[in-house]
Image (cartoon, helix red, strand yellow):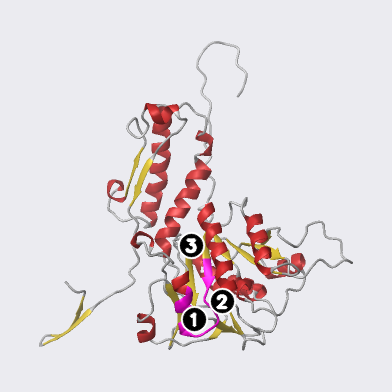
Amino acid sequence: MSVVQVPGIYLEEVVSRPPAELRTGVPAFLGFVHPDDPTVKNATPRFNTPRVVTLWPRVEQIFGPLPLDGYLGYALRGFLQNGGSLCYVVGLDPSVDREAALLAGLKSLEPLDAVDLVCAPDVMLPVPGGVVRPDQILRMQRALLEHCSRLADRFAILDAWPSSLGGVLDQRRALQSSNAALYYPWIKIQDGPSTPGGLVPPCGHVAGVYAESDREFGVHKAPANVALEGVLDLEDDLTDAQQAALPKGINCLRAFPGRGIRVWGAQTLSDDPDWTYVGVRRLFLTAARWIERNLADATFEPNDATLWARITRDLSAYFTGLLRQGALKGNTAQEAFYVKCDAETNPASVRDAGLVVTEIGLAPVLPGELIRVHIVNSPGGVSIAAPA
């Protein structure tokens, strides 16, 4: 501000800064990497340190050649092929217990608020001897679920077991979370690993679909009905009848003649009907991230009507933006959301405890997962209409 010496009124233009951009569709990949080359001086350790990756050459620049018998490299390549542009990679130490290595990698991710997706393709690696251990896989996947649930700002993309259809049914029954989705079956890619038959877990390719969908439409859009790039075949070519018999929470990859191999499901691993759909759950997770980031400076402000009005104003502006994007249903803001922060939600007992309580309600748009059309053959000709 300029210094003035004469009494009077002075006008000064102030340009307000917009809220910080909240990027979504940013996964963290955890997988095993080779130890540091002792002949190369590298100031940053390869293990348990999240590193930014935007281009494939950056991967080997950071970690060196990735293990050919692991799935991390294939997942990263699939992410970039399918629309992903920014991710974090955490190298896991192959010399320690596999479960301990994963927990250490997850611990390193906790302070990172730029991540909203988590993928761990190397969870699916067989133990020495080529044996798949479903019990070990479940423990590691549950560690991923616990990580996402505890931090409450990220979503896990899980791979199905590399097995028959019966195996994924057992896996689904053993997993429960609103902050994760499960994808089946594995995919065959060009230049894939020699075992098992060029097949890899699909989480990296699916994460790319999430990133592309977020960028094009928004986090509320179901990351589905998108053709996967770089996929030659599926481990199991499901039919409509087979998919219809599956329980909720198993998202299938399907091959359709003339339409490629597509993500054909967008459900979470939750049995709570409020959190059935990936887009709905991620919308609320993203809203919580936005609130934490953009209202943090309200901490320690006087807990009075002025603060309540500011919180209501800022949140209403953000949710109005979501309504305009098509994330909320309703023709007006009153139909799409409400924000209540006043003397009723903040009585004297709440204020004396140093708390500010805001009640928020959102009406998310649900995906049109099942679309039914009636085809009527009448004397006047054939007509197509939605059912009454």
Judging by the rendered image, the residue that carries numbered circle 3 is 214
In the displayed structure, 326 sits above or below 133; it is above
Start-end of magenta stretch: 157-171
Q: Residue furthest left?
A: 379
User: For this rendering, which residue is in front, 239 or 315?
Assistant: 239
Q: Which mark is residue 289?
A: none
Q: Residue furthest front?
A: 135
Judging by the rendered image, the residue that carries numbered circle 1 is 167
In the image, what residue type sits under mark 2?
A: Pro
Looking at the picture, how far across and down is residue 199, in whole percent? 59, 84
Neighbourhood count class around disc 3 (C-alpha, 10 Å): few under 14, some 14–19, many 20 upward: many
In the image, what residue type sits under mark 1?
A: Gly
- Separation (CA) of disc 2 from disc 3: 32 Å
Q: Is residue 221 visible?
A: no
Q: Nearer the viewer, mark 3 or mark 1?
A: 1
Q: In the rendered structure, are the residues bearing label 2 and label 1 in contact, judged by CB atoms less than 8 Å apart?
A: yes
Judging by the rendered image, the residue that carries numbered circle 2 is 134
Query: Along the horizontal axis of the image, is 353 left or right of 343?
Result: right
Q: Is residue 108 magenta?
A: no
Q: Secondary structure at mark 1?
A: helix
Q: Earlier in the sequence, mark 2 or mark 3?
A: 2
In the image, what residue type sits under mark 3?
A: Asp
Query: Along the horizontal axis of the image, is 205 left or right of 42?
Result: left
Q: Earlier in the sequence, mark 2 or mark 1?
A: 2
Q: In the rendered structure, are the residues bearing label 2 and label 3 in contact, judged by CB atoms less than 8 Å apart?
A: no
In the displayed structure, 96 sits above or below 316; it is below
